[in-house]
Amino acid sequence: MNRNQVSALSAGFLLCLLFSVQAFASDEQLSGMKNEISRQEQQLTSHTKKLNALQSDLKTQEQSIAKIARQMRETRATLAVTENEIATLNAESKRLEQLRFGQVELLKELLNSQYRQGQHSQLNALLSGKDSQDIDRMTVYAEKLSKARTDAINELSATDTELQLKRHALNTQVDKQRDLLSTLSADKSKLESEQRSQKKTASAIQRQIRNDKGYLTELRDNEKRLKVELEKAAEQARIAAEQARVKMDGLGKYKGRLQWPVKGSILHRFGSAQSGQLKWNGMVISAKEGSEVKATHDGTVVLSNWLRGYGLMVVIDHGKGDMSFYGYNQALLKNVGDTVKSGEPIALVGNSGGQSDPALYFEIRRKGNATNPSPWLKR
């Protein structure tokens, strides 16, 4: 074998070795890439599962808060009625006390008169030689006096009985008031505890979607969920509209005359940037927690539920493809199929859906398209 052949053989061997090393390196790189993709997919799946679990916890907590808030609202309403009844019973008791005092004074007067009459009895009149006319007149007077005394005693007895009944009713209402206040205090403590848990969960959710991409994805997914819910509600809306006893003539002719759902400052306006290229489809109005959210116009409730990203939400169909949306609520006061009038309370302001502060999300859609709600509301 000559030198050239040896050189060619060596070169071939080195080339084969080089290709083998490269192939081995490529296999290693490919395997590493696959492992990295698998790791990222697992991380993404884990991230999604954790986010979904947190959202599920948030839903449970906010539904619990809604239940307690409704109970507190009902308790306050009952308490107000009870306090009015107590005030009425107090006034009635005072009236009866005054009536009783007058009746006692009258009875004293009658007894005094009867005593004086006894000092001039018929026997004394006969012995004194008075004529029969005087005696008859004194007899009639004595009978009337006796009847008046009997009537006064009966009236006093009736007043005493009524007064006792009023006092018993008053004591019952006072006990009821005390129980209601105790219930309200316990509910308030439960509410505060649930709200602390809600804030922790909401903060954990915010950490999960902190980066812009994650937040943008979540917002887009929330919008998709809303569309799905509205599609489900479409048939219910049609049935409810047929049964509704309110005008379902749309919002077209009421522009600039719609009721504000809450009073407060506007935190986010329609069309302002929400994240990246995504803009607000409605407006966010700051309001006191627990204050009433009112229907902006007559219509039928087609959605009343917790919805991810929007919290506890009410959607009202006004007819002719017009709908109004009310989100972030603490509690919902209306159910699907309920008809509502303009200005009627439909929810209580809250911070559900993972919001940091109490506010109302308000949106108007016409034939499925979001429109700026501001020009539609009263100036």
Image (cartoon, rainbow, N blue to C red):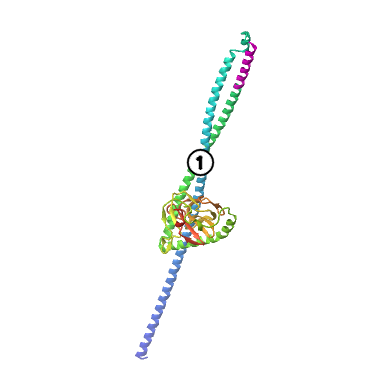
Is residue 330 rendered magenta in the image?
no
Residue at the spot x=52%, y=59% of the render? 322
**Which of the 4 image quarters holds residue 17?**
bottom left
Residue 90 locus on image (x, y percent): 51, 33
Q: Name the residue under label 1.
A: 80
Q: Residue furthest bottom?
A: 2
Q: Is mark 1 on a helix, strand or loop?
A: helix
Residue 226 locus on image (x, y percent): 50, 60
Residue at the spot x=53%, y=34% of the render? 89
75 vs 145, left or right, is left
Task: Examine the rendered structure and indicate whether residue 92 appears above or below residue 146.
Answer: below
Q: Callout 1: 10 Å neighbours few (<14), some, many (20+)?
A: few
Between 231 and 46, the residue placed more toward the observer is 231
208 vs 171, left or right, is left
Q: What stretch is highlighted in magenta?
A: 131-148
321 vs 288, left or right, is right
